């Protein structure tokens, strides 16, 4: 099990990025949360096995149909043992 802090940059707000992220996370069994940042980025904390996190990161680089992802930054963090994946308004 691994924890990633992920920042997605580009046209990623107003394109259902958070909703689509939750759907993909639920399909892959990824736990954590996603939120919109005031600067226009999307921030994600994700926890899962390496294989599922790799698949999740691949999806983050694409995003939903109307998104235009310019960059995805991720770094490993401390496990927080989230129980599910949520769309939130501010950092937990």
Image (tube, rainbow, N blue to C red):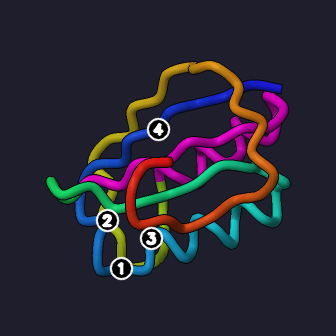
Number of residues whose C-alpha sits closer than 10 Å to that of mark 4, classed few (under 14), some (14–19) or many (20 or more): some
Q: Is residue 17 left or right of residue 57?
A: left
Instruction: Tell me how far mark 2 sits from mark 1, CA to CA.
Output: 6 Å
Question: Residue at the location (31% across, 65% down)?
Answer: 12
Dots 2 and 1: beta carbons under 8 Å? yes
Where, by quadrant of the figure, is residue 7 drawn?
top left
- Viewer-nearest of labels 1 and 4? 4
**Where residue 78 sits: x, y (%)?**
63, 19
Return the disc, 2 or 3, that comes first in the chain's sequence. Answer: 2
**Where residue 63 sits: x, y (%)?**
48, 63
Number of residues whose C-alpha sits closer than 10 Å to that of mark 2, classed few (under 14), some (14–19) or many (20 or more): many
Of 57 and 14, which appears nearest the observer? 14
**Where residue 3 sits: x, y (%)?**
66, 28
Question: Residue at the location (28% across, 49% down)?
Answer: 9
Q: Is residue 49 left or right of residue 5?
A: right
Give yes or no for residue 76 being in the magenta stretch. no
Dots 2 and 3: beta carbons under 8 Å? yes
Q: Which mark is residue 17?
A: 3
Give yes or no for residue 58 being in the magenta stretch. yes
Question: Residue at the location (57% across, 20% down)?
Answer: 77
Instruction: Tell me how far mark 1 sits from mark 3, CA to CA.
Output: 5 Å
Q: Quadrant of the N terminus?
A: top right
Helix, strand or loop status at disc 1: loop
> Magenta segment, which residues?
41-61
Dots 1 and 4: beta carbons under 8 Å? no
Give the residue pinned by disc 2: 12
Give the residue pinned by disc 1: 15
Dots 1 and 3: beta carbons under 8 Å? yes
């Amino acid at each position: 099990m691994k924890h990633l802090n992920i920042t997605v940059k580009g046209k990623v707000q107003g394109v259902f990025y958070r909703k689509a992220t939750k759907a993909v996370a639920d399909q892959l069994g990824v736990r954590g949360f996603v939120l919109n940042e005031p600067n226009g980025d999307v921030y994600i904390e994700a926890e899962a096995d390496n294989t599922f996190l790799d698949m999740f990161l691949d999806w983050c680089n694409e995003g939903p149909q109307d998104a235009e992802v310019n960059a995805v930054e991720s770094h490993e963090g401390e496990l927080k043992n989230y129980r599910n994946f949520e769309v939130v308004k501010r950092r937990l």
